[in-house]
Image: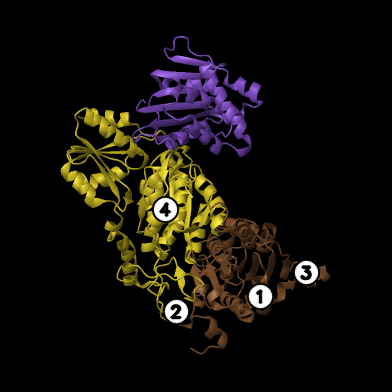
Amino acid sequence: MNCNSTTKNYYRTEKLPHIWCPGCGHGTLLNAVVRAIEKLGLNKDEVVVVSGIGCSSRAPGYLDFNTLHTTHGRALAFATGIKFANPKLHVIVIMGDGDSSAIGGNHLIHAARRNIDLTTIVFNNNIYGMTGGQYSPTTPYGDFATTSAYGNIEKPFDLCSLAQGAGSTYVGRGTAYHTRLMQNLVEKAIQNKGFSFVEGLSICPTYYGRKNKKGDAFEMHTFYKENCVDIKVAEKDPEKGKNKILIGEFHSCPKPEYTESYQVIIDRFQGMGV
Amino acid sequence: MKKNFELQLSGSGGQGVILAAIILADAAIAQGLNAVQTQSYGPEARGGASKSEVIISSEEIYFPKVRKADILLALTQNSYDKYVDFLDENGILIVDDHVKVDEDLPNKVYNLPILNSAFDKFGTRMVANIISVGAIYALLGENVIDKNIMLRSITERVPPVTVEKNIAAFNEGIKLIRG
Amino acid sequence: MSNKKYKLLQGNEACVEGALAAGMRFFAGYPITPSTEIAEISSQRLPLIGGKFIQMEDELASMAAIIGASLTGLKSMTATSGPGFSLMQENIGYAAITETPCVIVNVQRGGPSTGLPTSPAQGDVMQAKWGTHGDHPVVALTPNSVQETYEYTVKAFNIAEKYRTPVILLMDETVGHMREKMIIKDPSEIEVINRKKPNCKPIEYIAFKPDKDMVPPMAAFGEGYRYHVTGLVHDETGFPTNNNEVAENLIRRLVEKIEKNIEDFSYYEEYRLEDAEVVIVAYGGVSRSAKYAVDELRKKNIKAGMFRPITIWPFLEKQIREVGLRAKEIYVAEMNLGQYFLEVERVAGKYCSVKKINKVNGELMTPDEIINSIGGNI
């Protein structure tokens, strides 16, 4: 296989090709994550990539780090154990929309609330892909899925607002089209000492796209290109942000980090009363 | 001494009957005896009926629960009503003096002003449990557990700032029995 | 009294003492009666020795967190009771298939559902065996005293580490909340086993390739051995596969590494069994009543004895068969409607009569109840 140096250095190339469908946005999002790690020059031995269950969860298997493919929704809880047990490790958690906000919603808000130093990246394709196209907590109102045959009557989560509201100290959104932005956001998220949340808008031509007549992968990428506006632009000129998807860095506000706060307790009490 | 003593301490949640039982069990093992302490309680942290049990024995204790109580302490009417049937036919009953005891109860009964003494002499009903420990200790007798061991057990199990008050309460309990 | 060799301790306190003696350095849990003291004491003690305690958002997360911590090399434990144990089942299966050592304490209370939160029961015996889906290895130990809780918590860690498997300490409210004398051992008297580590170079490390003892050496995340861990069926490299032969071999190895080594952790007590015709099989809190009952029955000239499994899973088939061959009658006394009975009957039923004595009202089964059940049948 012909590969560039990033691929050679950071992927388990023998595990490729990946299982994702042609046109899936996950590969580009994953590459943005890898390039961010490369740019920061993290020691591969000290990087742990954790995932849950779903299409997104297969990502760590392709990466040459310490990798953990856990149970559905629980990635952040496993990651909390890893980070807390060994704070030297850089723990990056890749989840899907259903994975992170339906079955794993409780773990998401609590990991954010604790402000534990985890870099959480959600590959949001608005659908349960692995199981064949059921509606998820981010499927837009009125859209179709195999379990919303008459249109979705549930209101979707804004994952970034959810993460920020729960206490996440770094929040941003990129897309599978805006790969450079995505890479920048992940870089900053890794650098933030605390709970960071980056939503990567993905595309699922196979299920979400097909069910909702969104066209092929090219058209779905074009949709992001034409309908996403950086929050800085929208803040300067609200007209430009009207009825658009906001992307960019939404929130960056460092606060005391969980494992550091616990270390303060250890430093103060270690050796006492033993 | 008798081979084993089965003690049942009851009251309402928050009166400290569990701590009282722990102090007795702690002292018993410090004395070189065997002791098992258990409790049963409801969902309430305060109020409700609370029961704590101690078995003290010179032999290994298998069944950890009181089958027939040699001494039953009841600090409330509710706990007396609920647990009086556990009293052995030769068992001794200690009740706070506000508790109405069946007139035909054949057992030896000590009606003691435990709650009022706690309040009048120590300014807090919090020490009623330790007054009770004093009373139970006095009935068990010095040949079962040494008094110094009892005092040490109390000292180690109550909050440090209350040690003096609790030791005085313990002595008050002994006085209520021995006069 | 600090120079004293023994202490009055609660079962739940003894569990933490045992865990610390075994080397526990990580605890994640969620409050639940009647196990909460284990979390409370762990939260106080662990930072004093540089260990970590975290209260997670639920028991699903607690179980996940201890597996994560164990993957970094720390000995990890959680503690719960019935409702929480139900939630932990998902990731107990994950620990089993990923061969991640950890200890799960279940202080049993009345069930099903919220049941009787402050009362003893033994209704989770079968759940401990079959709670998580799929065939999987299970080791469950059942202490019946404060002293045993201490000692078998240590053993639970040792088995978990030696065999890379989750181990369940199946307590009950009686033992968890009971206080009695416990002898504090000197650390030199306690055998502590640590997991096997790879001694090859990282490049040569095949993460799930077992040694002759069927257990693969385990590297910690962060030590330079970059490997993949998944709850999917995987080959020796740790990567998922649908290969039928690999799947068959993996599941068989996971189960057999425990079942073929059962002699290594077959713990039990035999009481007055030599000439016993009537044998009470009991475990945990109920066994204390059973022992008392044996003495009382002997006074009535009934040749009674007791067999008490401490290793409740895997099932002590060899020992129970022996009991069945020698006894005329076996009574399985337990605080459920006959769970362990099913296994005893399966193995001993062809040799002698196997009957059950059950109680599910939230009170510890008494010696009198056992005596009356047996007396009525003799």
Q: Which tint was used for chain B?
A: purple
- Decide which of tag 1 and tag 3 comes sooner along the chain: 1
> Looking at the image, do the residues carrying marks 1 and 3 touch, with CB atoms under 8 Å apart?
no
Q: In the image shown, does C282 or C360 lie closer to the viewer?
A: C282
Three-letter amino acid code at the position of disc 4: Asp
Residue holding disc 2: C202
Same chain check for tags 4 and 1: no
Whole-number angstrom distance, CA of label 1 to CA of label 3: 25 Å
Residue depth check, mark 4 versus mark 3: number of the one nearer the observer: 4
Q: Which tint was used for chain C?
A: yellow
Task: Describe residue A133's horizontal placement relative to residue C152 as left or right.
Answer: right
> Looking at the image, do the residues carrying marks 4 and 3 touch, with CB atoms under 8 Å apart?
no
The correct choice, above or below, for A250 with respect to C225 in the image is above
Q: Which mark is residue A241?
A: 3
Q: In the image shown, does B31 or C377 lie closer to the viewer?
A: B31
Which residue is found at the position 55% from the left and 28% from the top?
A: B130
Q: Which tint was used for chain A?
A: brown
At label 3, counting other C-alpha atoms closer than 10 Å, the crowd grade (few under 14, some 14-19, many 20 or more) is some
Q: In the image shown, does A31 or C45 lie closer to the viewer?
A: C45
Q: In the image shown, does C241 or C155 lie closer to the viewer?
A: C155
Chain under disc 2: C
Which residue is found at the position 54% from the left and 84% from the top?
A: A9
At label 4, counting other C-alpha atoms closer than 10 Å, the crowd grade (few under 14, some 14-19, many 20 or more) is few
Whole-number angstrom distance, CA of label 4 to CA of label 1: 50 Å
Q: Secondary structure at mark 2?
A: helix
Residue holding disc 4: C186
Q: Position of residue C165 (x, y in %)?
A: 39, 61
Q: Position of residue A129 (x, y in %)?
A: 53, 67
Three-letter amino acid code at the position of disc 1: Glu
Q: Which mark is residue A187?
A: 1
